[in-house]
Image: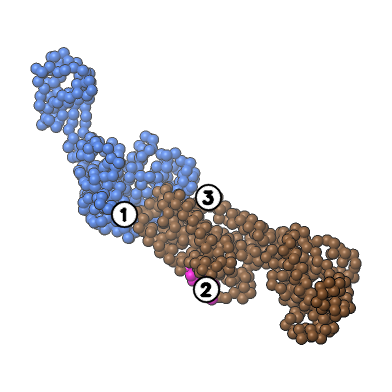
Amino acid sequence: MDALKITFKDLTLLSRDRRALVILVAMPMVIIAIVGSSTGRLRANREQSRQGLMIEVADFDNSESSKRLSGFLAGYENVTVRQAEIAADKSESQIEELESERPDGDIDVRLVIEPQFDALMRDLSPSELTSPEQSTREKGLAGIKLALLFNETAADPMMEGLAKMLVKLSLQHAILPIVAEKVPMFRGAANRAKEIPPPWAESETAKQTSTDTGNRVYQFFIPSYTVLFVFFLVNIMGRSFLDERDMGTLRRLRIAPISPTSILIGKTLPFMILSLVQTSILMISGKLLFGMSWGPQPFLLVPIMLCTSAAATSLGLMFSTLAKTESQVSSFGNLILLSSAGISGCLVPRAWMPPLSQKISLFTPHAWALDAYSEVLTKETPDLSVISQSCGVLLLFSTMFFVVGRYRFRRDN
Amino acid sequence: MSALLDVENLVKSYGSLKAVDDLSFSVGAGEAFGLLGPNGAGKSTTMMMICGLLQQDSGQIRLEGKSLNREIPASRQRLGVVPQDLAIYPDLTARENLMFFAGLYQLTGTHRRQKVDEVLEQVGLSARADDLAETFSGGMKRRLNFAAAVMHEPVLLILDEPTVGVDPQSRAHLIECIRSLQKNGTAVIYASHYMEEVQAVCSRAAIVDHGRLLACDAIPALLKQIPFEIELRIGNVALPESLALGSGATVEKDGEETVVRISTANVSTEAALNHEVTDILTMLAKYSIGVRSIRTHEPDLERLFLRLTGHKLRD
């Protein structure tokens, strides 16, 4: 009960400290938006991440070959294929329009497959299809009616080259049955079913495209920056303790008939509440503003949020009992924050780190929190053992920090 | 008077420095006890040990016969402490500050609200009860600082320089509040460098230096250690050698001026002192030496303090 009195008092004081509230809530959102827009895309601008390629296919032929072409394209990793809406009459004007106007928005490349694509392919001679002479093949393929257009705002020579190569490879695979009909030696290859993807409309990618609005960039950024900013509490808590010490009220609390543990819990709880509010706001705004997905089992986020907040506030408590001056709070606080954020994978995905760095990162609570968030947010079926292990380690960190903080607090004087 | 607080053979060292060295004193119920000493004498350390902020190396502190154990928070329930430095939340109102501290001392509900209102009235802050403490003057903050320590009606109130930096009105008001509490049975330990305040508030006092107790007694008894003096200033005049002063008088130079002092330290009785003064004045008149001023120096704690602790500057 004594702890709750201190908690209520600190919450009142925090509610009057607008600077701290801005740092804790507004700043993370601003930074997520800035970093997200510079490396990914804002929801309002471009839905999909630049980490992948979004190809719009306008299939005016709708033949087995054209569907196979789309299917092969969709089969490549990090390539998303979306079907363009085509009028029932498949008018020339619509073809011309799609072939003349560059794609915009979140579409990187548009592939227009004109009518008669399949028929023209079948009309090609075996030599035009398989000649070792490039000029002969090109002469034959020149008649194939395919058009490739690139997004003007996302103009990138590498992306264009990559898209052309993917279309070329997909085309080769798509026409394999036709080639096999004309050149028997290709029949073996054509019969290997695994090399022939299902027609586009039935592919998994096609099924997902219409519903998956998640943004992969923010799937990483929001949890990372949420964890990073939750640990920003270390600084704010340090300052709160320092203020209490400077105002002489910490001494008054210690003189009062309450235990040191109650004082510490009372001083920690407001920041735990604040941290949970901060995380909730970031998760909600992540979904609403940036299109982040909460994964298939969002309720699993709750224990992760609680354990992460517990670890962060306990670290803040320990730090508060160690830092004695404003400059110590600023310098050591920022050092702890930035170094642990860098080591843990808040700034750079852990998967990009060398193996040794990945192991070292596990000495930070941030890394365990990120692992747990990643499991819930990115896996189709989150592994409960991974989440419970991460939460367990976070609670261990929390206990360890609290015990050290309590020891320091009692020794203080 | 039965002892409310017993401090026995208290010792506290910081490394090789003995901050408190075998200190013993007691404070009776409802008694106002002055604790005097120069900076670094061990007063604050002693008070911190009584409050439970510091653990003594050895010795006993008992309140109402029970040991004040730093590990048992409830043992501090009957203590009130007014720290030297302000210890209030500037971003809370006066009422919020007091409600919070009252809650820590287990005051609840209507009783808590009533006590807060009562104490606000007592320290003259009712009109500003709902203003943030940061908007208060120094004196108002001091009064709020005081109020926060007395809401739970402690049996022992420890005041560490409670009037530092306040205007005379606030000082007088605070001293009146302390006297009022004492009349209602609250014992007071009053540490201050303002000796006249200690003399005005306390019935007994202890003087400590270098962690040791130099004197501890009722204030009148302490003052008996200091002589009553009469000082005659006669200007820049050399006294004739034939002028025979009595044994109770001394002559000294204060710059250009000759000063004749007659002190109870050198005469046995008040009657002898009166006789001595009359004799000297008669003789000075006989030699046509005019007296420029006559001053009396009554015994006070400051003189006793300086006599016991010396004039050497302290850090």
In terms of sequence position, does the residue under pointer 3 or pointer 2 come before the other?
Answer: 3
* Residue A343 locus on image (x, y percent): 52, 63
Residue B27's tag is none
Q: Are marks 1 and 3 on the same chain?
A: no
The residue that label 1 is drawn on is B54
For the point 17% across and 24% down, the residue is B252
Mark 3–mark 2 contact, CB under 8 Å? Answer: no
Give the SS element for disc 2: helix
Tag 2: residue type? Ser
- Mark 2: few/some/many CA within 10 Å (<14, 14-19, 20+): some
For the point 40% across and 64% down, the residue is A403
Where residue B245 sits, quadrant-wise, is top left
Find chain B in the image and tell me its colour.
Answer: blue
Q: Quote the CA–CA distance across marks 1 and 3.
A: 33 Å
Give the SS element for disc 3: loop
Tag 3: residue type? Asp
Q: Are marks 3 and 2 on the same chain?
A: yes
The residue that label 2 is drawn on is A388
Mark 1–mark 3 contact, CB under 8 Å? Answer: no
Q: Chain of mark 3?
A: A
- Mark 3: few/some/many CA within 10 Å (<14, 14-19, 20+): few
The residue that label 3 is drawn on is A17
A128 or B225, nearer to the observer: A128
Where residue B282 sits, quadrant-wise, is top left
Mark 1–mark 2 contact, CB under 8 Å? Answer: no
For the point 90% across and 67% down, the residue is A92
- Mark 1: few/some/many CA within 10 Å (<14, 14-19, 20+): some
Left/right placement of residue A372 relative to residue A258 reads right
Number of numbered discs: 3
Above or below residue B38? Residue A43 is: below
What are the residue bounds of the magenta stretch? A385-395
For the point 53% across and 50% down, the residue is A17
